[in-house]
Amino acid sequence: MLEDLSRDECFALLGKETIGRLVYSDELGPAAVPVNYAVAGQNIVFRSADGSKVRGLQNGGVAFEVDHIDYASRSGWSVLVRGTSEEVEMEHVPELLRQIDGDVPLPWKKGIHRIWVMITPNTVTGRRMAGVAFEDFL
């Protein structure tokens, strides 16, 4: 059984996780990469080093997806954010940090991650799937 989630439910679920997939386009086409993130108000923020991911964000719209699966109960949820991204100027980072509810995103990859990126949602959609049994498909 699929249940559509409200925007508020989506943000509540986003606030419970710390890793999502950033989807963008670069010169090779669509790409999806995992990033550590945080929720700041109604925006998604993450840190990055300079590279293809940051350059790809300049090509237009982005998507951000987070999900949680419970294999034992065959249930879970998925939230998809579609919007735009922008690099946060360093002088605005302290203000951004005050908006984060929870921990600041810490990259796993070694290196200097001085670039802060904020995704501003245009749409936020989500679905929850509750316990579907294999027998339901027979």
Image: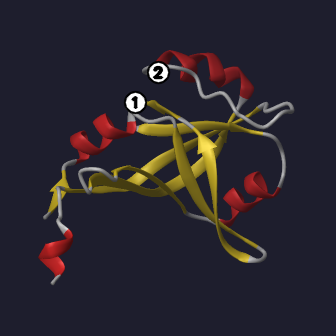
Q: Residue at x 70, y 33 (%)?
A: 107
- 112 vs 63: above or below: above
| Nearer to me, 38 or 41 | 38
x then y, percent, for residue 62: 55, 60
* Left/right of residue 3 with respect to residue 100 in the rendered view: left
Q: Residue at x 71, y 31 (%)?
A: 89
* Residue at which label 1 appears: 41
Q: Residue at x 23, y 41 (%)?
A: 9
Mark 2 or mark 1, earlier in chain: 1
- In the figure, residue 96 lies in which quadrant? top right
* Left/right of residue 3 with respect to residue 120 in the rendered view: left
* Left/right of residue 91 with respect to residue 2 in the rendered view: right
- What secondary structure is found at the residue carrying circle 2? helix
Q: Quadrant of the C terminus?
A: bottom left
x then y, percent, for residue 68: 38, 48
- 49 vs 27: above or below: above
Inspect the image, locate mark 2, and give the three-letter code of the amino acid beneath it.
Answer: Gln
